[in-house]
Amino acid sequence: MAETPQASTNFRYSTGIRDEDIAEVRAMIGQPLRIPQWNLEASIDTIRHYAFGLGDDNPLWCDEDYGSRTQYGSVVAPPTFPYSIFPAGIGPGFPGLQVFQAGGRWELKRYIRPGERIVPSATLVDVKEVEGRRAGRMILLIGETIYRTRAGEEVARNLSRQFRVARKGTDTRSGLNYAPRSQAWTDDELDCMEDEIIAYRRRGEVPRYWEDTQVDEVLPRRIKGPLDMQTLIAYYAGNLAGGFYRSTDMQVRHRRLALTRPDLVPNCRPPEAQAERVAYGQGHFDGKVAAEVGMPGVYDNGWMRVGWVQQVVTDWMGDEAFLEVLDTTTHLPNIVGDIVRFTGRVTAKREEGGRSLVDLELRGERQDGELSIKGTAIIRLPRKSH
């Protein structure tokens, strides 16, 4: 009978940000990273599950009959669907430091279609020391993930930004320390929010032409929330399960592998974190863990918030347009009970390289008026004369 490998005791769990850790991670810049892949193939179901996880039932993503009548001839995947292949989480090294999504830039070439196998590759691009108003000293990791077909065609590229922050109480110079808070609503308030959701309309099959789009045009206001556990579970089921989240037996085997053979587990996250019994992302579901990492309560997923911004844009632009660039910056966390209202406006329109483009400025605010996320987008719109 083969001997069971014993857990290594060589791992070092840092309690703060150390210069030697910074140097060690900087040495990884440009090196290919080992990354976990969740969805291997875009399919009718993986596309639909990802869209439903965002609360986005656009028939262009979800209805085969509808998709067959469009210029694409089938359903297509939402622009940020590659998150479900690999969620562009580049945060190597710094054992013991918490990971928070800070934003990122999507550059999109075309829609991904059912039946396509997508292969991601990732590298660390830069490591910066920054100061945060709420967290003190932080590390900002910038990573690049490229998504290609098996034939090598690039379909999407993501430049991600991740904060690494000391956990609460471990470093006097850094670490989040939000005061606990909660958010509750009356039935009348919830009725008004539901009416707002029902009244919202997407552009859909009606083309939005470049000629008819004006600078300073305002996008319809869009509400998301209130955030609840069902929403979080739906998102994780469609996007992240299996990549970083595993069921019991697989958790145990993966933790043991991280302890005994760290060279065999993904290194886009520190093996030490992958060996922990309480996953560093469990604050998305567990209030105690959320408090331990300095958050005000069970909090949302930053990638989900990016998907919400995407939905605001794709609902506005219509089926014949294409989202070329989406660049977002994540701000204050949303906790269970919070709502976010999104607004946007057209800031410019231009013709470039034979493409008719408009620029958007986007913003999402919580019910307390605090900024949740902001961003910009570049949209390619159809022309009446083409």
Image (cartoon, helix red, strand yellow):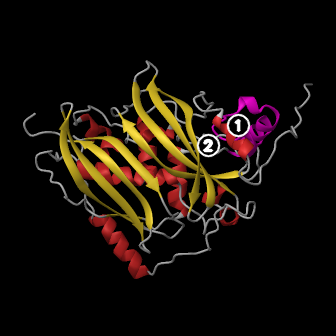
Q: What element carries label 1?
A: helix
Examine the residues drawn in magenta and state their main secondary structure: helix
Mark 1 / mark 2, whichever is N-terminal: 1
Tag 1–tag 2 contact (CB < 8 Å): no
Q: In the rendered image, which residue does mark 2 sit on?
A: 91
The disc placed on residue 333 is none
Confirm whether the magenta stretch covers residue 215. Answer: no
Residue neighbourhood size for the residue with mark 2, other residues' Cα within 10 Å, grouped as few (<14), some (14–19), many (≥20): many
Looking at the rendering, the stretch of residues picked out in magenta corresponds to: 247-273
Relative horizontal placement of residue 254, taking residue 344 as reference (left or right): right
**Image spot of residue 5 (x, y percent):** 87, 32
Mark 2 residue type: Gly
Q: What element carries label 2?
A: loop
Q: In this view, does 251 lie above or below 231?
A: above
When asked about the image quadrant of residue 247, the answer is top right
| Residue beneath the point at 9% across and 40% down | 384
Residue neighbourhood size for the residue with mark 1, other residues' Cα within 10 Å, grouped as few (<14), some (14–19), many (≥20): few
Which is in the foreground here, disc 1 or disc 2?
1
Relative horizontal placement of residue 70, taking residue 149 as reference (left or right): left
| Residue beneath the point at 76% across and 41% down | 255
Task: Locate the C terminus by quadrant.
Answer: top left
Q: Is residue 159 above or below residue 4?
A: below
Q: In front: 282, or 142?
A: 142
The disc placed on residue 24 is 1
Q: In front: 74, or 88?
A: 88
| Residue beneath the point at 76% across and 37% down | 258
**Image spot of residue 294 (x, y percent):** 65, 65
